[in-house]
Image (cartoon, helix red, strand yellow):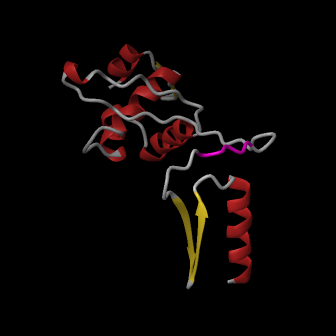
Amino acid sequence: MNSFLRSLGVEVHASGHRRWPDDVKAQVVAETLAPGATVNSVAERYGVKPNQLSAWRGLAKKGKLVLPAAIDASAGAGELPVFAPLVLREPEEPVEREASPQSGDLLRIAVGVVRIELPAGTPARRVAEIVHALGAEA
């Protein structure tokens, strides 16, 4: 097992301590994402504890461990999903876009028995105000 890990670039110390390079961690995490793979089976293959592998998966989900690019399907291995961090930011100033209403296009809002129809070009800010008001009344 140690020679296998060393071939991957893992430092194996005499004490048994291992230092895993980030690219090797990322490859191991990517293997857990393959169809039918389990954290336990991949952990066993690499001689790592499942909870450690789960911690690496958590790093990947947070964007702190970059997984390798998906493998080309023509290579026979299929595509592996990758984690990417999602960052949501509020716009500094709300942008209102005017929709170009087509004849008969209506925006319908239904809350309980209340039904409201608005022209498709109604600004988003106004729609939000109406929805908020309906929620406050309900």
Q: Is residue 91 visible?
A: yes
Q: Quadrant of the C terminus?
A: bottom right
Q: Residue furthest right?
A: 92
The quarter of the picture where residue 59 lies is top right
Q: Is residue 7 above or below residue 63?
A: above
Q: Residue at x 55, y 85 (%)?
A: 113
Q: In the visual, does 53 lie left or right of 131?
A: left
Q: For this rendering, which residue is in front, 56 or 85?
A: 85
Q: Residue at x 37, y 45 (%)?
A: 39
Q: For this rendering, which residue is in front, 35 or 94?
A: 94
Whether 31 is among the magenta residues is no
Q: Over which residues does the magenta segment extend?
A: 95-99
Number of marks present in the image shown: 0
Q: Residue at x 71, y 68 (%)?
A: 130
Q: Is residue 88 above or below residue 79?
A: below
Location of residue 126 in the rendering, given as x and y in whole percent from the top left corner: 73, 59
Location of residue 18 in the rendering, given as x and y in whole percent from the top left corner: 50, 26
The quarter of the picture where residue 78 lies is top left
What is the chief secondary structure element of the magenta stretch?
A: loop
Q: Quadrant of the N terminus?
A: top left
Whether 97 is among the magenta residues is yes
Q: For this rendering, which residue is in front, 12 or 106?
A: 106
Location of residue 107 in the rendering, given as x and y in whole percent from the top left corner: 55, 62
Q: In the visual, does 17 lie left or right of 47?
A: right
Location of residue 57 in the rendering, given as x and y in whole percent from the top left corner: 48, 40
Q: Residue at x 74, y 44 (%)?
A: 90
The quarter of the picture where residue 10 lies is top left
